[in-house]
Image (cartoon, rainbow, N blue to C red):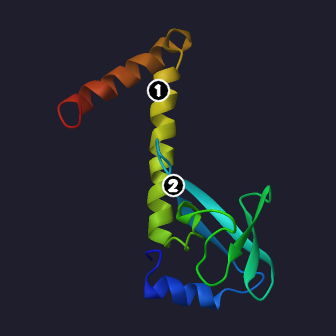
Amino acid sequence: MRIWSDEYKQWLASLKVGDSWQAIQPRRYGAADIVTFRITGETPARWKIVRGAGVFEEVYKKDNGRIVGSDSAFDLLPPATDAELSALREEHANERAVRTAETAQWRKLPIETVKAVAVLLTQLKGNAL
């Protein structure tokens, strides 16, 4: 769902206290983050929303989804689809696997493990590397 689309505006109008959803928060560098939003309060014109693990409580305008006192870079993020969340979780897992391989202390591992990884990498070299 794109911000400012009719679908987004309908979604904003349907929100109520107690609603929660997961959204994808883009980042400048690296993979995006999965962020949970929960509406904890409201006034006629605004929502009080907890972002993340309850550390960040922000106030958003009901009419346009913008955080109060900020610019359009802080629009309320719409819910992500299950497919989008799954793809991002897989991307995070792949990044963790690469970091683990990059930071492994190979000389401290059993030689059998290092040899097995070397064989696997040799097999993959013709296909993916």
State the SS at label 1. helix
* Residue at the spot of label 1: 101
- Residue at 34% from the left image edge and 20% from the top image edge: 118
Residue 42, position as x, y percentages in the image: 80, 82
Residue 16, position as x, y percentages in the image: 72, 87
- Residue at 46% from the left image edge and 52% from the top image edge: 90
Q: Quadrant of residue 71?
A: bottom right
1 or 2: mark nearer the eye: 2
- Residue at 44% from the left image edge and 59% from the top image edge: 87
N-terminal of the pair, mark 1 or mark 2, is 2
Which quadrant does the C terminus fall into?
top left
Residue nearest the viewer, comparing 124 with 49 = 49
Residue 4 versus residue 91 in the image, above or below: below
Q: Quadrant of residue 57?
A: bottom right
**Residue contact at pointers 1 and 2, CB within 8 angstroms:** no
What is the three-letter code of the residue carrying label 1? Ala
* Residue at the spot of label 2: 89
Report, in whole angstroms, how far the alpha carbon at label 1 lies from the one at label 2.
19 Å
What is the three-letter code of the residue carrying label 2? Arg
State the SS at label 2. helix
